[in-house]
């Protein structure tokens, strides 16, 4: 069986689809740019926002580049000392680069689209919808396009240029580093390729962390700062041009919801595909090398099909002139649901082609269904149509305290259904894929559930990125004093965006959980690989030669990876703690940055003459600058924590501790993220519900209490909650990349810790 | 080695100490009753509170009796069908009975002591301290006395009357149930005895759950209801006799902080001793039967020593006339710290007697030190002396929203040190006890860390129960219009109580975590026992005869108890969710009950003529009744959840699922409890800090924001947070008791679930 396999011809479908996605993204972008950008005022305001957003992103990339440089050097040193693969530092960079590129393109598109959407709304609601949604689609297609392309390119390079038959036979060396070992077998090649590729996810993850945390801090600092002083103290409405923080607030929507969300899902998307490929290699090579190749390429092909169907779905989003809100919502749903349904059909095709077992197809369906249920549950807990949010509005009659208590309770309660759903999803995905009798195959099924859930990301992300564009269009209309009729239309689009944003958040955390589960399993493959590769470790455990075929129980025995091992339970404790401490830091950061913003707005109100009468010009740029600087400064510590803890924890607690840390972070992070997202969403909508007239309407005491709830919910739902998505994925990615360090050094550290009991004996 | 061992003579020390504790409890009670009860007004008010508290507790026991009856029957049925030991239902009842008895005695004492403390304060501060503290000591000594006595009695009965040499040789049967099997060996006897005894902890746990949850709902419903309408709407001060909910509020302090806290720690106390005994048996029998007996009896003996030292400590709490606040605090600390220090000395004695290895002594020290650090960390995060609480007060200047955000962040951050402490504590306790090379022995060390931490419970609980007595004395003084000088003295005592209460809460959750860790290990022993006892299970796994000697790795292999098993990870997910959903329910319950209370107070203000002028008499009893009914109704669902989920989850997810559930519940519950307790404490003290004059003092906007924070914190720190202590212990206890059900039936259910993949194949 030691022959070099041939990549099936239809694998080419995947890179082709990814290129097509980029082509269509370009087309949509061009299309948007062609549409009229509105009058001079509108272009000027949009220009401010665009400049602010670009200034922010440049500054953020400046920080990120430094972090990447340090990590690149660190990984390079590891490679030189043969405790990491030499491709890893490079893969790390490409992951970060493509993720950053997507954010940049998405932001440019979104900030250019806002005034055009407002202009579109002057012409008609549907014109506005089309501009906004297709601009959102640019983000969606760029993310899946670059994501899949990056994966395919790496696969191609490793398969065709690095692991050539000649190199595998004689080895390949560079600057004293071993790229390919002498006598590498075909199955070793497959395992090494996929575990190496997985590490480029760490680059995407790191980039995503800074985008989410930095963007989240920025957007909420601006929002809260603008509201507390502008709305509450000075009593001027939202998006009022007299408020100096208005532009920063609009910039924030782009920074947080477009760039942050995009980077988050880029990472989930790549992570799920890469983890599933690695799991496929791990299972496949124990069977038959041909089957193994099929199992490795299948995730890429499924992703490629998903990309095509997403493009198809985008074109389905259209509606007649004069459509109602409900019809608009149905138009969006038509696009996403059709794509999802067709994915299932396509999977049966892949099954028929013999690439994946029938059980795996059902695993994907389990993932898709879980995604839908989580979205519905989010909707139930956060929409004012249902009891939980109305209950919060009712408690608002008794004041802010009961509003908060009830919101916290709703948030905590809302974690129930998503957890039960993900548990059933995992069990089904695992069971269907023949997992109860074959753990490896079952894990492959879980990976595929994640891939399936994210397959139509091209269009689901479009519905997400569309929201802030519509929101900004509203801000643009308000600031330029367009007729109320236009504002009403942008509000309709905005409200549509709020609904998709809520379900989108549930989808983001659900896919993050499944992806992290798959990565957890891939981590184990990475550990198995390195046990054999590090001679001192192999000698210590008495294993010889290739260890990728190691049976799970042997591996469990080597590291005592059972639940009675206190190191593992300590890891779970630390993982649970990480989720909370990380949230505390991001929340504190928002508070501090918002305080600075509030001080600045107050200062301008006091110092700039005629500002509140509309005759003095507020200094928008200074507010943008304050939010930018605040976000940059505040994002460093929590981000570093997410990188440092898995490594430090791993060195002290070893492999069982890392697995505990990841499992604890994953589970608690998932529950906490659901709580924070949904509590925030429910407070937001409870306030809106009161504003629409319930319990006394605007200006009543209930409304004041509702505003308090909304403000508390802001950092929960837009900073801390979504950042947890990244935390759980990044900790896993870091663990994967630093596997050899932990595998090599932790036994020595633990032996040293063992001195105390030796003395006592 | 199959000889019947002789209980060492010094074991008798344990029951003797427990009886002595009860004698001294009686003495202190008598002493308190002798001191003057104050004037007629004071006695009348105290009478109201006492009647309300007793009415509540009778009603609660009425509900609890029904729950116990159902569970008793259920356990009885299991015993009849040979899937549970016949002693278990009886043990379950005794655990519940003694816990309830302690609550009753503690409440009677506390409610009688309040007016006497107020009267004492009329005579002098020290007289007041003495009455209040010694009354608190009644609760402390009753809890440890009955707890240890119950354990010793069960040990004696099983050792001397049931597992007699004759019964062990020929078997003992009753109504068709097997009490002792034919041919039981001495080591089997030891394992069976200890695992049976552990199940009486479930009775104590169930009782504690209702006490904590019901009491927590009661106290906060009354408190929030009284505050929202009385303080905020009508503008009358706290504890004002014109407020109809005042008596209910005072009753609540007793119900929640005396009975609830007492039942909570009774359960931890018994649980830690019982779990450690079981772990001792499990390790000991693999060595030498004599050593095993030593390891089983050692926890009881250590507990006995702790009881004696606690009594000694109570007598150390005394101070000169005219002592300052600082001196008072030092007086309390002298008592607790001396007891703790002497425990360590005594342990070296036990080591010298050859009962426990030196490593275990260090494990205890690890537990003690961890307890102190957790207490200090709680103090840091919740006292207005330090930055976190002052930061909240500062944020209060910007309004309630930032107050809440900052408090949430402080709470989340405060979980850091306790987690790191408990992790280090576990690793040290485990490592010192020779655990890195012998997992069983290491777990025994963790158990002993818990026993050590709780050994001086007699006096630490006294400092806790003292708080509400002082608080109530203040209420009594206020309502009876005693001179401000007396109120100042009771306030001084109350403030002292607040400090001890904060550290006490940290101590309660820390000991709960260690106890749950030990119980988790004991659960595994129980599973091992039943694998062999159930013939169909033994046949399925191919094990024969006695299975208590099963090596851990064999056991891990049988059940796939490793972290790659998705059933285990699903369990962790569910455990994390349980903590949140349980908190959501208790929080919602407080909201609903407080709403009813507020409505009632408002109704009385409107309908009773002259009530606000002090001429009309408020209807106190109706408010007490509303709180009582609310608490009774609301405590049922969350409590049942804690009992049902481990059983249902176990049947579906099997043994790995249960272990995941317990680990997830333990870790997330611990983190969440720390967050809620500390956020609540910090909000409370931030408000007090503002009231003392910071940021504008009473009546300022900052103060209003502080009051909102305090109200939000109330259910966090006094209902949901402390209830988590019980949740994590009760879920473990229920799992232990229902082990045979899960071990027997879950394989069949899982096989049935496995049908889907079979069809797909």
Image: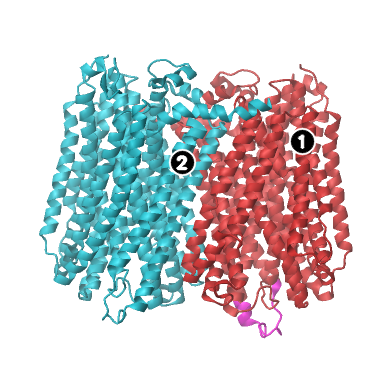
Chain colours: A red, B cyan
Whole-percent x, y for residue B699 in the image: 41, 77
Is A160 drawn above or below residue B22 in the view shown?
above
Q: In this view, does B716 lie to the left or right of B38?
A: right
| Rendered residue at 71%/76% (across/down) | A241
Residue B536 visible in the displayed image: yes
Residue ID for mark 2: B645
Instruction: Determine whether the residue tagged by mark 2 lies in a helix, strand or loop.
Output: helix
Is B449 drawn above or below residue A401 in the view shown?
above
**Marks 2 & 1 on one chain:** no
| Rendered residue at 74%/18% (across/down) | A183
Chain on which label 2 sits: B
| Rendered residue at 35%/34% (across/down) | B75
Whole-percent x, y for residue B224 in the image: 39, 66
What secondary structure characterizes most of the magenta part? loop
Is B757 drawn above or below residue B614 in the view shown?
above
Q: In this view, does B461 lie to the left or right of A261?
A: left
Numbered badge on residue A652 = none
Residue ID for mark 1: A347
Instruction: Determine whether the residue tagged by mark 1 lies in a helix, strand or loop.
Output: helix
Residue B324 visible in the displayed image: no
Q: Bounds of the magenta span?
A: A602-620
Quadrant location, the N terminus of chain B: top left
């Amino acid at each position: 069986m030691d022959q070099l396999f041939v990549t099936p011809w239809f694998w080419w479908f995947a890179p082709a689809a990814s290129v097509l996605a980029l082509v269509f993204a370009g087309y949509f972008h061009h299309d948007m740019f062609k549409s009229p950008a509105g009058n001079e005022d509108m272009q000027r305001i949009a220009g401010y926002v665009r400049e602010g957003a670009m200034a922010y992103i440049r500054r953020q990339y400046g920080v990120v580049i430094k972090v990447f440089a340090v990590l690149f050097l660190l990984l390079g040193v590891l490679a030189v000392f043969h405790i990491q693969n030499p491709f890893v530092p490079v893969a790390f960079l490409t992951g970060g680069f493509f993720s950053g590129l997507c954010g940049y393109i998405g932001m440019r598109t979104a900030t250019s689209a806002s005034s055009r959407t407002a202009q579109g709304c002057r012409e008609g609601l549907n014109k506005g919808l089309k501009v906004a949604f297709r601009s959102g689609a640019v983000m969606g297609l760029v993310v899946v396009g670059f994501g899949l392309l990056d994966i395919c390119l790496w696969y191609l390079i490793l398969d065709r240029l690095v692991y050539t038959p000649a190199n595998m036979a004689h080895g390949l060396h560079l600057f004293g580093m071993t790229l390919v070992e002498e006598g590498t077998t075909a199955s070793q090649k497959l395992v090494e390729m996929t575990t190496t590729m997985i590490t480029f996810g760490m680059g995407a993850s790191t980039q995503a962390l800074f985008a989410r945390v930095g963007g989240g801090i920025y957007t909420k600092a601006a929002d809260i700062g603008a509201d507390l002083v502008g709305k509450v103290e000075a009593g001027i409405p939202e998006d009022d041009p007299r408020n100096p923080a208005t532009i920063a607030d609009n910039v924030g929507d782009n920074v947080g919801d477009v760039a942050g969300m995009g980077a988050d899902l880029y990472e989930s998307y790549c992570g799920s595909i890469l983890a599933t490929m690695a799991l496929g290699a791990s299972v496949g090579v124990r069977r038959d090398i041909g089957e193994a190749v099929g199992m490795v390429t299948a995730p890429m092909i499924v992703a490629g099909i998903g990309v095509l169907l997403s493009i198809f779905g985008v074109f389905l989003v259209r509606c007649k002139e004069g459509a109602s809100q409900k019809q608009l919502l149905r138009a969006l749903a038509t696009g996403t649901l059709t794509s999802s349904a067709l994915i299932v059909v396509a999977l049966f095709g892949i099954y028929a082609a013999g690439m994946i077992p029938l059980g795996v197809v059902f695993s994907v369906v389990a993932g898709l269904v879980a995604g839908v249920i989580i979205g519905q549950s989010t909707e139930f807990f956060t929409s004012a149509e249902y009891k939980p949010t109305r209950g919060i509005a009712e408690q608002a009659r008794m004041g802010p305290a009961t509003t908060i208590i009830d919101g916290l309770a709703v948030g905590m309660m809302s974690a129930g259904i998503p957890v039960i759903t993900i548990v059933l999803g995992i069990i089904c995905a695992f069971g269907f894929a023949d997992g109860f009798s074959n753990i490896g195959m079952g894990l492959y099924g879980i990976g595929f559930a994640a891939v399936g859930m994210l397959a139509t990301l091209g269009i689901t992300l479009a519905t997400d990125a569309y929201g802030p564009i519509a929101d900004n269009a509203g801000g643009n209309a308000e600031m330029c004093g367009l007729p109320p009729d236009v504002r009403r239309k942008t509000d309709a689009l905005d409200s549509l965006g709020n609904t998709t944003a809520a379900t989108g958040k549930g989808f983001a955390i659900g896919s993050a959980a499944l992806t992290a589960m798959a990565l957890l399993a891939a981590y184990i493959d990475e550990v198995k690989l390195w046990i054999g590769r590090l001679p001192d470790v192999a000698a210590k455990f008495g294993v010889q030669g290739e260890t990728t075929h190691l049976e799970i129980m042997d591996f469990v025995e080597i590291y005592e990876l059972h639940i009675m091992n206190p190191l593992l339970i300590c890891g779970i404790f630390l993982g649970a703690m990480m989720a909370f401490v990380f949230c505390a830091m991001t929340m504190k950061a928002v508070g501090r940055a918002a305080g600075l913003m509030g001080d600045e707005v107050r200062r301008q109100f006091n110092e700039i003459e005629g500002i509140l009468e509309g005759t003095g010009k507020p200094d928008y740029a200074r507010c943008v600058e304050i939010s930018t600087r605040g976000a940059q400064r505040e994002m460093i510590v929590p981000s570093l924590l997410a990188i440092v803890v898995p490594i430090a924890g791993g060195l002290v607690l070893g492999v069982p501790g890392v697995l505990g840390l990841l499992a604890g972070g994953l589970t608690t992070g998932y529950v906490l993220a659901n709580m924070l997202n949904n509590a925030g969403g429910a407070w937001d909508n409870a306030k809106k519900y009161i504003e629409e007239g319930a319990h006394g309407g605007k200006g009543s005491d209930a409304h004041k209490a509702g505003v308090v709830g909304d403000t508390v919910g802001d950092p929960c739902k837009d900073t801390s909650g979504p950042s947890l998505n990244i935390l759980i994925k990044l900790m896993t990615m870091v663990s994967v990349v630093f596997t050899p360090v932990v595998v090599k050094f932790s036994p020595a550290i633990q032996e040293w810790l063992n001195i105390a009991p030796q003395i006592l004996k």
